[in-house]
Amino acid sequence: MSFLSATKMTGGYGGADIIFDCDIEVEKGEIAVVVGPNGAGKSTAMKAIFGMLDLREGSVKLDGDDITHMAPQDRVRIGMGFVPQTRNVFVSLSVEENLEMGAFIRDDDIRESKEQVFELFPVLKDKRNQLAGELSGGQRQQVAVARALMTNPTLLMLDEPTAGVSPIVMDELFDRILVIAETGIAILMVEQNARHALEIADRGFVLVQGGNRYTDSGQALLANDEVRRSFLGG
Amino acid sequence: MELLNALALFANFVVVPATAYGAQLALGALGVTLIFGVLRFANFSHGELMSFGTMVTILATWFLQGQGIGIAPLPTALLALPVGIAVTVLMALATDRFVFRFYRRKRASPIVFAIVSVGVMFFLAGLIRIVIGPDDQSFADGARFIITAREFRELTGLKEGIALKQTQMFTLVIAVAVVAALFWFLQNTRAGKAMRAYSDNEDLALLSGINPERVVMIAWIITATLATVAGTLYGLDKTYKPFIFLQILLPIFAATIVGGIGQPVGAILGGFVVAYSEVMVTYAYKKLLAYLGPEGWAPEGLVQLLSTDYKFAVSFIILVVVLLIRPTGIVRGKVL
């Protein structure tokens, strides 16, 4: 079984189901990308994995432990880091305070993690005393990822990390995400820029109408004619 | 000389009382803004919480006075203040535990919370009437003045004196100390930063493992402390009138909104803006203008913009104007 394995997830926000029999898996050190058209339930699937909506059926297992009914806050403590799509930084706190809040659950020395994060995102070191709300969109995304990394996660979940940033910043962010994966963290992300994301993905999940349509390696999905025609614009 | 007299007159009747009043309002508004920042509702029970804290402080003061314990020339109430704070903190935590938490679990909307807080307000008001009664209580003892108007006149040879009451001095010193401690807490401690983070973005705070119940508890402890200090200082400065605490809600809310809701710095600025406006609009400028005008001339009327009976109207006007023109307040806060 994979490090994270979500199987047969079915559920929604109380009304009609949004995802049906949805499976998502990630291994440590791997990048898994969830793509699909608008309204396919990509973000919902992410939220389901993080416990932010009640599943009617299916289960979520992390490292073999069943966490289907665990509250989101408790998932942070067992090593799941989550970067929401919007409102993902504390705008009225400085960059450094954002990182400290990321490490709130830790009682050990966080200086080393801070240094590692600053190494990963050097621009944040220069702006450490600036309010996160005063940063550019791309820098803000970096703060958001950095905050989540400060919890020392074994699984990092990113909900459209490149939404609203320029192509250059997007390349840079993907590049950083690759570096993070190399440290052995499992990465699961939802991406709007499907083609680009699949290029760095070890595993890709194409969701359509709340269910799995294609599941394969990123390269294989890119090579798949049908996937390209339907979801990657030719 | 005339100019100096005018300045002394202005300081005595406007600057000194408005500064003391402003400090009291600022402390009150800080409590309201903190609860708004963390629990996201307008806490109408804050005035009665101030009253409750003052009442407990008065009871403790009487007990100490009965025992013959005092710290003359300082008012005994300062010695009793920690007791007032402790009991008020317990009361605030109790109302949270038995009332507000229920609605928090139900994820009630802010307007429901505000109405619930009105209920708590009436409950506290009733409790206060039962315990200490509806009458005025004077509990200030110790030396009354640091410098009287006459002493000041003799010292400087001016025609106008500046009287400085001991309570006004304390109000300012204690307010500065409390505010400094609060800001230090919010900026430098883990719990303080967590509180700011929670106020900024509740969902992300949860994702960072910040325990909301703990943040809420700390917010109530600080609010109850601020309320007791503010109420006691107000009571020392004037007298303790249980009925005044319903009225004082208006200037406190005005100060909160003028400053920017959820912004501690704004609450302080707002407190002084409202206090100075109230005092300056209701002050009769006749004598001041007589000093500043040509020799032997004096305005015919009192040159008072509004009678003091209307002083609460001033806060109301400020409130309406700010909501219309700059709803975010001086320091950009949340919009109601």
Image: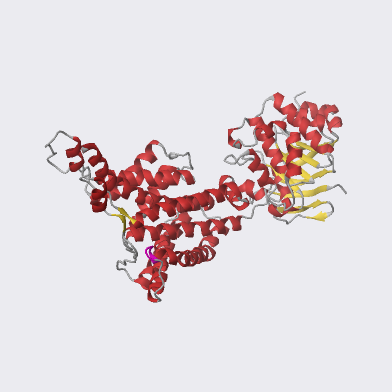
Q: Residue at x 48, y 41 (%)?
A: B333
Residue closest to the eye, B336 or A199: B336
Please tell me whether residue A177 is drawn above or below residue A71 in the rendered image: above
Task: Name which quarter of the figure residue B59 lies in.
Answer: bottom left
- SS assignment for the magenta stretch, majority: loop
- Residue A47 sits inside the magenta stretch: no
Q: Residue at x 80, y 46 (%)?
A: A154
- Judged left or right of residue B81, residue B286 is left
**Residue B144 percent location from the top left of the image:** 31, 60
**Residue A91 percent location from the top left of the image:** 59, 39
**Residue A103 percent location from the top left of the image:** 70, 47
**Can you see residue A230?**
no
Q: How many numbered markers are drawn?
A: 0
- Judged left or right of residue B118, residue B2 is left
Please tell me whether residue B129 is drawn above or below residue B168 in the rendered image: below
- Judged left or right of residue B117, residue B154 is left
Residue closest to the eye, B326 or A187: B326
Q: Residue at x 39, y 47 (%)?
A: B271
- Judged left or right of residue B76, residue A18 is right
Please tell me whether residue A231 is drawn above or below residue A156 in the rendered image: above
Q: Which residues are magenta?
A: B72-76
Which quarter shows the C terminus of chain A? top right
The coloring applied to the image is secondary structure
**Can you see residue B289?**
yes
| Residue at the extreme bottom | B67
Residue closest to the eye, A119 or B210: A119
**Residue B231 percent location from the top left of the image:** 39, 59
